Image (cartoon, rainbow, N blue to C red):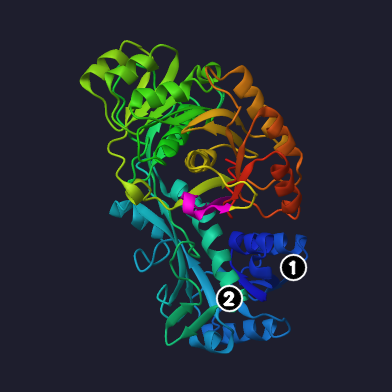
Amino acid sequence: MKIAGLASNRGRNLLHLDDVAPGGAELSVVLSNNDGAPVLESASERGIATEVVEREAGESREAHERRILDRLDGYDFDVVCLDGYMRVLTDEFLDDAPTTLNVHPSLLPAFPGTDAHEQVLESGARTSGCTVHVVTEEVDGGPIVTQEPVPVYEDDDVDALKERVLYEAEFTAYPRAVRWFAEDRVTVEDATVTVEGDTGGAFPQRRYTSEDRSEELRYGENPHQDAALYADPSCEEATVVDAPQLNEGAKGMGYNNYNDADAALGLVKEFDDPAAAVIKHTNPAGCAVGDSLADAYDRALRTDAKSAFGGIVALNRPCDVDTAESITESFKEVVVAPGYTDAALDVLREKSNLRVLDVGPLGEGDERFTEKHTEKPIVGGRLVQERDLQSPTADDLEVVTEREPTDAELETMVFSWKTLKHVKSNGILFATGTETVGVGMGQVSRVDAVTLAAMKAEKDAEGKSAEGAVMASDAFFPFPDAIEEAAEAGIEAVIQPGGSVNDEDVIEAANEHDMAMVFTGDRAFRHD
């Protein structure tokens, strides 16, 4: 798509459109009614054709616009984009030209006119933004194509607000509108704009997020990085954000504390029965489900007490005094639970720097997971995906080996899979019963992840062994070598997604070692 740009001054939006080429759109020409407009030099330096058609003394608007149309007649363009073009166009121009767009520095219909920023500040509005609209002879009254909001802060003046609207709103909304036209998705009819596909749903064309700063953090991942926590007030799920800190006097939560606490809470939400997890750098150092909370914590800790030092503890039941006493036997940074008994708080508060977070009731079943998507900011954008809420039962698993798993192995497989979803990929997890034995996380080689899990089970697990354990893998085994490594460690059953071109070779290796193997049909990668 080709654009004819009209500007009277700097034309920064037009130059930005040239920079980003939304939908492949290109500027054919930039025309100004001001011979001294800086946009002319800027466009020429970029190799864009330029034209100047100034209005002569006594010349009517219609006559001036006819000369503009005549000058543009030699160029190929599909849409006209105005940018600070300081003339009101008449029907003479609008009837003969293709669709003409303009961007206004407010959220129309509020604050029309040339002094929009002043109006916003005088009104006390807390949100401003911009509007891209189809130009009609009614000034700032044409049908709206899209809008983009920005906050208005207490200390804003006109210059500060103007800059935010330009760089955060206009530089977002104008390219979006042009891209929609370039993709032939816009219909303008009877003073109405319709955009094909601009609907809601899980992944809408546009996302507006509004979050309030909940807390300034001591620092980010490292002391030289500043950081803050922002809260989504609409979230209904139990979360560590804004969770009351019950140990007065303990130092504030840091970026890593929140990140790890969130990971720990997400893991224990997986289980209906009493569960405990110890997290280090968002990975489980250990996890277990038990008859009691204290039992679950003890078995989780004994997976790798060495790595659990300085970690985060999460519980899916209110913390009782027995569990609290076990937690305080070694150094922990944070405890996360849906409540605490008074006796448990007395014990936990003896550790002056232990952060104690009360996230409130977790809910039951699907109530525990009301947030259906996760997000990860990347430079220049944001990745959004469905949350990995898969929770297969024993009946969902496909047995692919000659030996079928026992009922006990099936129970361990289900536990392992729920836990493995929270291990960074490539991830391997060894488990017996409903407790972890060894975890191999974040390896670039799946065989190395098996080796690491076996080593942790052998060296760091207290009173546990890989002998007779179940191995879970978050993705398929591309070769039988990991099965050979697991067999050497004593693994007797395997749960994995399946789907490799070498599945038959992997199954054959399992059969040779009398292993039971099941496929889930879905992998459980976790890269964040």
Q: Is residue 312 magenta?
A: no
Mark before the other along the chain sequence, 2 or 1? 1
Identify whether 15 is placed above or below 265: below
The residue carrying mark 1 is: 48
- Report x, y in % for residue 177: 54, 69
The kind of secondary structure element at disc 2 is: helix
Taking the image as shown, residue 218 lies to the left or right of residue 182, namely: left
In percent of width and height, residue 400 lies at 63, 52
User: In the displayed structure, does residue 346 sit left or right of residue 467?
Assistant: left
Instruction: Name the amino acid, label 2.
Output: Phe
Give the magenta part as a residue range: 379-398
Q: Which residue is mark 2?
A: 181
Please report the residue visible at 54 percent of the width from the left and 32 percent of the height from the top: 431
Task: Give yes or no for residue 389 being in the magenta stretch.
Answer: yes
Q: Image quadrant for the N terminus?
A: bottom right
Q: Label 2, label 1: how many angstroms apart (C-alpha)?
A: 21 Å
